[in-house]
Amino acid sequence: MLPDQTDWDVEKPKLRQALGMRMKSERTACGLTLEAAAERSGLAVSTIHKIENGRVSPSYENLVRIARAYDVGIERLISAEAQTPPTTRMTVTRAGDGRHVRTDKFEYEMLCNSLAEKKIMPLVTSVTRRDPLMEDDLEGHAGEEVLFVLSGSIELVVQHYAPVTLETGDCAYFDSMLKHGLRNIGDGDARVFWACTYVDMKPEHH
């Protein structure tokens, strides 16, 4: 289970530091400078530097961008136990047994973490209530996404489209290149099954 707020306030700086160290280790193992990592991931140098130094928590989208840029599974960035590349080609995650990750905007349960070279990142996500989404709240990245509302009511905002309200049992599929975001607009908890295609990004080296 996720920690309560008091425990989380204590644990968050430690998790940020540990995540930053793993991300720096993966970057250096790839032989990438901060500038090269920024070019490959599409993130600002300052953003990567802050993450590596434990000053900010990366969003899921930024974790995906960095993992793709370093050509590693996202599990290697978030888990101290994932230092050896997984080799299985089939895996099962029992209810509640996924790896929990918490950011300022979402709480994720990452599923099927031991599957080798998977092209889809499956998540169960708890969506928080917040103010209407502005342009700066939206993010885009390569790939495609599908989300299925498990409980609650959410608003999905996708660039160039009118906001859509999704209720329990509703499903949406969209091009991740379009900037997007979602928020809980109901009175209770909102949870979605969320899957993002893990598109290989291997830009030419100069």
Image (tube, rainbow, N blue to C red):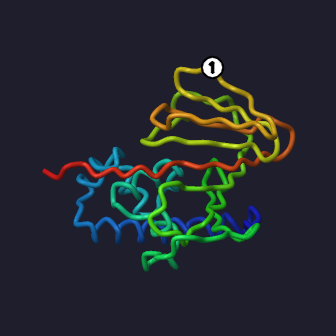
Q: Quadrant of residue 52?
A: bottom left
Residue placed at 51% from the left, 71% from the top? 89
Spot occupied by residue 40 in the image (x, y as percentages of width and height): 29, 50
Image quarter hosting the N terminus: bottom right
Kind of residue at disc 1 = Ala
Q: Nearer the viewer, residue 61 or 167?
A: 167
Spot occupied by residue 2 in the image (x, y as percentages of width and height): 73, 66
Q: Is 115 above or below relative to 125?
A: below
Q: Is 84 above or below relative to 51?
A: below
**Where does label 1 land, which residue?**
162
Residue placed at 60% from the left, 66% from the top? 112
Residue placed at 41% from the left, 58% from the top? 67
Q: Residues within 10 Å of mark 1 (few under 14, many from 20)?
A: few
Residue placed at 71% from the left, 43% from the top? 148
Callout 1 secondary element: loop
Asked whether, in this view, residue 56 is left or right of residue 27, the answer is right
Q: Nearer the viewer, residue 105 or 141?
A: 141
Asked whether, in this view, residue 164 is left or right of residue 200, the answer is right
Say how many tags the image has.
1
Q: Quadrant of residue 129?
A: top right
Pick out the residue farthest to the right: 187
Spot occupied by residue 31 in the image (x, y as percentages of width and height): 22, 66
Q: Is 143 above or below relative to 64?
A: above
Q: Quadrant of residue 147?
A: top right
Pick out the residue farthest to the front: 89
Spot occupied by residue 81 in the image (x, y as percentages of width and height): 52, 79
